[in-house]
Structures are given as structure tokens and as C-alpha cells.
Image: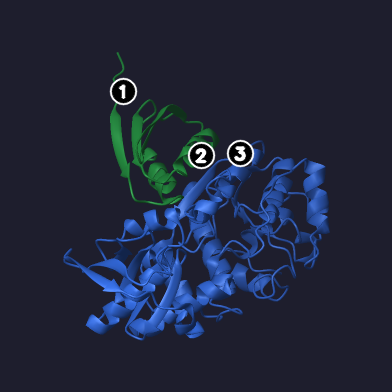
Chain colours: A blue, B green
Amino acid sequence: MSASAPLPTTASAASTPRKAVALISGGLDSMLAAKVMLEQGIHVEGINFYTGFCVEGHTHAIRREHQLKPKRNNALWVAEQLGIKLHIVDVIEEYKDVVINPKHGYGSNLNPCLDCKGFMVKKAREWMESHGFDFIITGEVIGQRPMSQRKDTMPVVARESGAFDRLLRPLCAKLLPETLPEREGWVDRAMLLDFNGRNRKPQMALAAQYGFVDYAQPAGGCCFLTNEQYSHKLADLWAARGTKQYEIDDIMLLKVGRHLRPRPHFKLIVGRDEGENNFLNGYRKRYAHLNATSHTGPLVLLDGQANDDDLLLAARLTARFGHGRDAERVEVAVTDLSGTTRTLTVAPLPANEIPAEWYL
Amino acid sequence: MVSVSKHALDARGLLCPLPVIRTQERVAQLAPGDILEVTATDPGVLADIPAWCRVHGHQVLETRRNGNLIVIALQVTA
């Protein structure tokens, strides 16, 4: 007998549709899982958690090259396609503990996927309980992800989230023990699926069957923590500060610009185009910053402590990444945290004098 | 006569989806018929707040841009 959570049964009359809260990432699998439930007459509402590490179209859209692409929040788009409500929940603060102290460790980068899944299902369970819903659904597929979606991790997520058998994975339910919604007859197990492994063809076939086109298929998943370069920058941030902490602005800035650490005690964030310069400009009162005044070029934020020699180096790097890179001299305005600006006239640092290890 | 209560939300400097989340949190405190005027700087709100309103049945009354500022007025439905 499987464990059953001591949760109240909320729908009283047989005619009242049972209610499921669906974790909606904006990708295809969670969209299909929700649709499978809607097809069975279940009332479904979506929930989407914002951790700060989400790969949002709008973060990409900061870069000018992406600005002509249509912007949309994929989770909202999925909800619209399904005709369901979507609740977007800010979990930035609570999520820090997942990233900083993952009980199950990290994946190949700083991705705490199993802890993350358990955390999100736990938050969905809390939402379910406070909103009088009956069960939780996810788009998980056994074998789809090497860390968090394996047959042996499915019960871990159900147990650690406290959802137990009120957690139903419609896309692979036939390969798992019966859940409460199946046993109680709220959903028909025979109509659930047995998807397994990394092959995406079954999902694509089901999407075609439902008439879904234009769904998001992010190549690197939906989280920056699975990205090697991003994780490297986060690890550098922790190492430089001597503590494994972060604030939302820290992790937003890791998504933007070219990051260089020329010295252990400071790093530079260099805007790569107008969109990034505009974004970084919003932080200019919180960071010392540099920009060329004799030529066009990037806005550069300086994170850390810098002495005069460091500022000279930072100015030469600022000149290097602007249109004055081939000039003999470039004037660079250096503004400290008090807002005082002085101008340094420098020779741009030649590319061959920038060691590869400075780039984060 | 039913009076319409008007409210304002400052979401300037926030990147999506945070303006949507703040809008959602504020709307949860309002009554049907109330109007919320959201001021934001992320152009993403031009797509996301109307999309959020559509999935929840709220009505976008007006969208206007003033330089980098975007103002979206929405009316809460039941």
C-alpha cells in the first residue's frame, strides 16, 4: 500500500469537478500533462515559480540582437493555449536555500535539480491545500532528466514534498504506482500514459494530436543553473565574496554582459550592446562604473574594491571593448560610489594582453 | 451608484515576470470593478500583463507609453 498524505478530501459532491494544480514551466511536457487532465474533465489551474534563475525570454531580450523577436512568457502562453488560469509565484527568497544547500547535491553544474523539483512540488502542495485543490500534476517523464526525473527519484520528490500520492505524473503514470486520484476514480488510469526515456517523439506525437504547434523547446532547459558558463560565474561570485550567498540583483547581473575578473578583489561587467548598456545603467548608482567619453563604447560596472592601479587597468579594458580599441589614447570616465567622476586617458589594453582566465 | 476604486502599482525597474507577479499580488487585494494602473519599464509587460489578464478574465482598459515608461490600466473582474 502506498503512503497517503493525511490531507482533506475537498470536493464534496460527485458532480463537482476535481481540481488539480499543474506545475507549468512553459515547456511542452507540463503543457501535455495539463491537457491530459483537462481531457478527463479535471479542473486544472497552473502554477509557475519564479526563482530568479529562470531563462526568461525577456532576459534574453535585454540584448539588442534579441529585441526584434516577439517576447512572451511561455508559461502564460501555455495557460492561454489550454484555457486555464496561471498563478506565477515569487519564490526568490525561499529558493536560495535550495541553491546554496542542496540536500541531494548538484548536477553537472550548479543545478540542484532534485531538490528543486521537491521544493516546487512542496510549494504546489501548500498552494493546493490553501486553495482547496485535490491533487498536483507535473509533466515529469521517467528517464527524461538524468538527475531529477528517474524512476528512483519519483518517490523521493513525492515524499520530500509532502505530496505523497496526491502527486500525479500523467505522462508516465502507467509506469508508477497508483496515486490517490487514480484509486479514487477521479481520473481514469487507463487514459494516462507510459512515456519513458529521453526520446521526445511520443510528446511530439501527442502535441500534434492535440493540435499544439509553436510550443517552446528550450535547448538548455528552463534554468540558468544548468548552464556551465552561468554556474562558473556564480561559483566565482561565491569564491570572491567568501560566502555562498546571493541577492536577486547578483544573479540578474550574472545573466548580462561580459564578465572579467582581472584581479581577485574586483571584476568587471561589460555591456555587449545598447540593450545591455541600458540594463547596466540601472545599476550605476550601486557600482563604481566606467565608460569611454572620447569614443562610443560599453558601460562597465566594477564589482569589488579597486585601487588606482586597478582603476587604470579597468579603464584600459573599458577602452578595449569600445570603438576606440585601435586608438592610441581613449578618455575614460571613472565614477566611484559617491558619484564623483574623473577622467583617465589610457591606451586600450591589447587583446593579447587579456589572459583567457580573466573571462568568466 | 457604484464607485470605482483606482489604485496604482509601481513596477519600474523590475524585469518580467516580476511586474506580472506584483500585479497578480495587488489584484488579489482588490474588488471586482477596481482599476489598477501599473507603471513599468520592462517592455515585456506589453505582452505579459495583457496575457495574464486574459487568462484570469481581467480587462485591459488602456496601454500607453511615455518614453521608457509603460502604463497599463486594467479593471478587475469577478
| Disc 1 versus disc 2: nearer the observer | 2
Alpha-carbon span between mark 3 and mark 2: 12 Å
Please say if A17 is above or below A266: above
- On what subunit does the disc labeled 2 rest? B
Q: Residue type at mark 1?
A: Val
Q: Nearer the viewer, residue A275 or B46?
A: A275
Residue at image mark 1:
B4
Picture layout, residue A243 above or below residue A55: below
**SS for dot 3:** helix
Locate residue A133, reporting x and y percent: 55, 48
Does the image show residue A101? no
**In the image, what residue type sits under mark 2?**
Ala
> What residue do we see at 42% from left, 48% from top?
B21
Q: CA distance from mark 3 to mark 1?
A: 28 Å
Q: Residue at x 72, y 50 (%)?
A: A32
- Residue at x 39%, y 82% (from the top left corner): A262
- Identify the residue position indicated by label 2 in the image: B47
Q: Which mark is residue A80?
A: 3
- Percent across and percent down for residue B17 are 46, 50
